[in-house]
Image (cartoon, coloured by chain):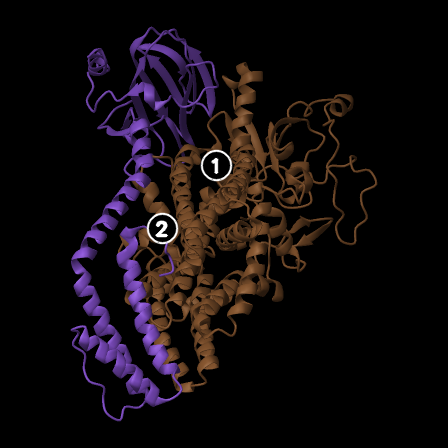
Chain colours: A purple, B brown
Amino acid sequence: MTDPPAPSSDAPSSLDRAWDELAAADAILVCATASAERARGHLEAAREAALADGIDVPALPADADRRALIAAARELAERIEAERRRRLGPALVGLRRRRVLRRIAVFLAWSSPILAYAVLRPFTWREGPWRGAFYPAKNFEGEPKVRRYSDVAFKWKEAAPFKTFPEDGFSARFDTCVVLDEEVEPVFRLSSDDGSRLFVDGLLVVDNWGSHPLRVRSGSIALEPGVHHLRVEYFEHTGPAEVELDASFDGDRPRAIPARILRYPGDEPDPEAPCAEVAAASAD
Amino acid sequence: MVVAVFVAFATFRDYGITWDESWHHTYGNYILEWFRTGFRDRSALSYRGDYLYGGAFDALAALFARSVPLPWFDAVHLFGALVGVLGLAATWHLGRTLGGPAAGFCATALLSACSVYHGHTFNNPKDVPFAVGYALAVAELVGAVRAFPRLDRRRILHLGLAAGAAMSVRIGGMLILCYLLAAVAIHAALVYRHTRHLEVAEGIFVRLFKAFLAVWALGWGVMLVFWPWAQLDPVRRPFFALGRMTRFNLHVRKMPFGDAEIVTYDVPWDYLPRYFLFKLPELLLVLAVVGAVLGVRKVMRAWNDPARIRELTAAAVVVLAIGFPPIWAIAVRSTLYDGLRHFLFLVPMLAGVGGWAAVELARRLGTAGGIPVPVLLVVFLSWCAREVAVMRTLHPHEYVYFNRIAGGLPGVLERYDTDYYGNGYREAFDALRDKLWRTDREGYLSRTYKVGGCIPAFIAREYLRSVLVWRERGDKAPLDFFLGYQRNRCFERHRHRPVFVEVARQGTPIVLVRDMRRVRNANPEERKAGRDPRPRPRIVPRRGEAPAPDATAVPRDGKAAGLSPRE
């Protein structure tokens, strides 16, 4: 019992340990006794006490050497220990239950920050709000591969976005819906190699189109509160491929548009009104 | 510890990518591929020197990063921070084992207020996980020694898992098994000393040796789970790796050390002691020393008491766990660099001993000195709070901490390694973009800026959005900005170029961003006018080299971008 201030719910394990220690101490005591006679005498006394207590223990072997006495001492201790556990069983069950409950409470205390984080930062844990449709030709033709992304920031270098795509001569269209609570005039910064352009509600705001190395173009537009559709179109002609959109909604430097103001337009948005569903959901 | 979890979640995005991280995360992915492809993808068997390390942390971090929708390195930093919190729990366990619940609390508080440990938890993929495994294993070992000569299955299981966890990060964790074997031998020897019966001591030794074999087998198995290279020859290869690690001599370079400049493979004997003296909070140092003194007194009193054999054995284990690694490193003149980073696993040990010492000291001062324990507790916690306040001023570069004995961070500039791991670059890139946005908005919205610095290109690219473009090797285009940190005196390069952005803590630069645009096309007068007006940091003369007569005359190095320091 090395931990007296421990709560009572820890008692079962502490008792177990204490009995373990006592059993070991018995064995050591016998081992450390100077003569075999004294060891035998000690064990006989312990055995009689156990028998008087109603614990069934075997008789000591006659003419036992020191090793046999050690084994007998260990067996005696284990029998006594087992009987103690059996008798205290019902009381220990209650204590063990309290210990389990305490552990569950500690686990909840530990996990609550994680749960809180997951609740407070929901968009971090969801799939991205950008719908990316990739075409194996540079004029948006062919069967598109559709994926969700958290951001438009791609650097494919000399490679293709998918193994089945050509390294050169592919195109992509990225759509999302931005939900604004107040009127703002965001600044958009679009860089790409090769061409790219940004449409806001169908209006061309940044034109970085054409075959060229990495180039940056910017633009801004006043936006009313409500839902607005953003579309980035991109094509790769030859050489390295990359495209990136940054925006500043609050006068701070342009960064990736925060996911908290973006909504996914759906896997198959209406071509005429891609954000209609999002607008309806926002109105509700 | 709940507070530590909150702090981890609130700050994990602030930390930069350190030199080792990319390698370890690639290795972790290779290990996952080893399993995913049914052992056909053999990349993990020969990847750099990493195949010589167990990859438990790397593989689990990669698994975590694949599972959560966070950017890769942010996810890994969060995972590392949570492992660091596990280290706090391990230290609590150690302190509690040594001196009860109060000691466990004090040990946790001491480690929580230790800047070096906290700073490393987020982005150190090997030293911190190893420290956690080591602390856990030593705590279990001390608990096991307390139960000698009986080791039940639960203890064997716990000890085997903890030792395996340490070995699965670094093969040096095998020390735990050596300590266990030493504890068995010491215990048997002490029993013999008191009983004078050889058969009794022999019986105890044989019994405990069987338990040791069980721990060894279990730990070995755990170690192998995430170590593909060792799985192919599980008996010999771990020992081969151990041999290679003890002769580790990579990363040969010069580094400042006080008033001298030394090389990594020829460090003076006081390299480690001095870093421990300067990098740990003073309270932790004081309590560790007090713990050592009290420990010696306890050992002397227990020496002739047969009832305190286990106490003596436990003390021997703690002394071995703390003393053996550094003494061995000093004795064999190991290659050392980055301060105490490779010996970070001793910090939780010292915190555990410090926690025990704090409780012992409080008890003695309370009974003999008449000082109420609550008063002592307030003093202790106030000191910890003060350390946390210092950590806050350093955030997110907590590991560059130096204590007041060394004069704080200003006192060690150019004299000791500070940001050896490149954590400051993340903030430097962010600050550079912020300043460009404030001062050159038109350029920011219409062009890119070419940057270079003493940082591997594959890490630099993680920080770049399109506004900054990394100058690749062989690219002759002029730089717009150069980012230099302290290691290899990188921030002294291009000294005649003005400092555009400074990442500093406690008034001491960590990363300097130099503007290469203004003077590129300037005439000599303008170039002189654009020179950095601040006094040049003192240059430490190299061995056998006279100090420069005019320290401001010549930049030490014209090398620019694309330099990729190993590690």
Q: Residue placed at 38% from the left, 6% from the top?
A: A222
Query: In this view of the protein, which residue sits in the foreground, A209 or A41?
Result: A41
Is the residue at mark 2 from the same chain as the one at mark 1?
yes
Could you tell me the amino acid type at mark 1? Answer: Tyr
Q: Is residue B233 visible?
A: no
**Horizontal side, residue B558 vs residue B434: left or right:** right
What chain letter is assigned to the residue under label 1? B
The N terminus of chain B, quarter of image: top left
Looking at the picture, tell me which residue is in the foreground, B98 or B307. Answer: B307
Furthest toward the bottom, the residue is A63
Q: Secondary structure at mark 1?
A: loop
Coordinates of residue A7 in the picture (x, y in percent)? 32, 50
Determine which residue is flagged by label 2: B59
Residue drawn at x 45%, y 17% as measured from the top left? A217
Give percent across and percent down for residue B56.
37, 54
Residue that label 1 marks: B15
Local secondary structure at mark 2: helix
Residue B506's tag is: none
Crowding at mark 2 (Cα within 10 Å: few <14, some 14-19, many 20+): many
Mark 2 belongs to which amino acid?
A: Ala
Q: Please, which chain is the residue tagged with disc 2 on?
A: B
Measured as percent of width and height from the top left, residue B7 is found at: 42, 36
Q: Give the percent coordinates (x, y) of residue A265.
A: 24, 20
